[in-house]
Amino acid sequence: MPWFKRVEKGIHTPTEEKKETPDGLWYKCPSCKAVSSMAEHRKNLSTCVKCNHHDRIGSKEYFAILFDNNEFTELDANLTSGDPLDFVDSKPYPNRIVATQKSTGLKDAVRSAYGKMNGREITISCMDFNFIGGSMGSVVGEKIARAIDHARKTRTPFMMISKSGGARMMEAGFSLMQMAKTSAKLALLSEEGLPYISMLTDPTTGGVTASYAMLGDFNIAEPGALIGFAGPRVIKETIGKDLPKGFQSAEFVLEHGFLDFIVDRKELKDKLTNLLSMVCEKDADNAKIKTRKATKAS
C-alpha cells in the first residue's frame, strides 16, 4: 500500500518550504517539568497549570493584573540614574544603565502608577528584576518616596511589590540611604492612617527586605517566593550549620510569623480588594466615632 511506503524515490523539500516550530510557543515548568503552550501559561497569569509554580513577572504584568482594564497613570516615568561615584567595573555605570534600558525597555528597576482596582483608587510601585537584578539605587528610592507622597496627597492606599537582589553596589552609600528615606516616608503614610500593603515576590532580598518590604501594615507574598536578607549559602558559611528545609521560602517565613498571608496570583486582585474594603470601612467607622465624640464635647 502506498500509504505506508514511499513510492517515489528522492523526494526532497526545498529549504524555503521547510516549516519549523517558532521559538517561544511552549513553556516548561522549572518545578514539575510539565509542558504547556505559552498562550495557556500566560492565560494562567504565568503560573504552572499543573503544580501552580509562580514564574517571575514584571511591572507590566502586575499592572495588567491589578489595574482595571490595564488603565493607569504612571508616575515619574522618565526618572533615571546619575553616576555620583564615577563607578566603573567591566564597563562604566552610565553605559550599563543605557544598555539595560535598551534591552529591557525600562528606565530603572521600579515603576509607579495609580489607577483603579475593582473601582477603588490605589497607588502601586512595582520592581522589575530584569533591570540589574531589581537592585535598589537612588532612583528606586526616589520613585517609591514620590509614590508614597502621591498616595498621601490623594488619600489612596499604597501597595509595594518587591522583587530585588538588594542594594545597587554601583551607587554604594547612595543606595543604602534609600532604606532610611523610604522607611521615613512610610512612617508619614502611617501617621495619616493610610494603609500600606507590601507584597514580596521571588526574590526579595538584601536591603529591600531590611527596609520597605517588611514594613507593611500587611506583609503578603506569592507562593514559593524566596524571602531573606543574605542568601542561604552565605548564612550557612557564616553559622557553619545546615539550614532547615525550605529555608527562606514564603511558606517558611509565614510559619515563623513574618508574613500575614500567602496569596495566589490568580486571586490577588480580589483578595486585595476585600482586604482594603475591610480596612477602609473600619477607618470610616472610627472617623464617625471621633466626630460624634467631638460633637458631644462641644
Image (cartoon, helix red, strand yellow):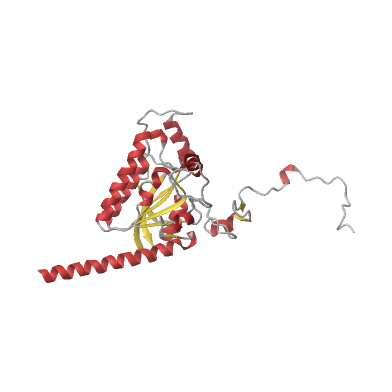
Q: Tell me if residue 172 comes above or below residue 20 in the rendering.
A: above
Residue 78 in view here: no
Q: Which is nearer the eye, 39 or 29?
A: 29
Q: Quadrant of the N terminus?
A: bottom right
Q: Quadrant of the C terminus?
A: bottom left
Residue 280 in view here: yes
Q: Tell me if residue 91 comes above or below residue 126 in the rendering.
A: above
Q: Which is nearer the eye, 119 or 17?
A: 119
The tally of labels here is 0
Q: Toward which corner of the image does residue 69 lie, by quadrant?
A: bottom left
Q: Is residue 287 left or right of residue 48?
A: left
Q: Which is nearer the eye, 38 or 142?
A: 142
Q: Tell me if residue 268 comes above or below residue 206 in the rendering.
A: below
Q: Is residue 220 left or right of residue 37?
A: left
**Could you say where residue 219 lies in the image, as x and y percent from the top left?**
39, 56
Q: Is residue 51 left or right of residue 256?
A: right
**Could you say where residue 135 lies in the image, as x and y percent from the top left?**
43, 41
Residue depicted at 69% across the width and 47% down the height: 20
**Could you say where residue 163 lies in the image, as x and y percent from the top left?**
44, 48
Residue occupying the far left of the picture: 298
**Could you say where residue 140 lies in the image, as x and y percent from the top left?**
37, 43
Q: Which is nearer the eye, 263 or 81?
A: 263
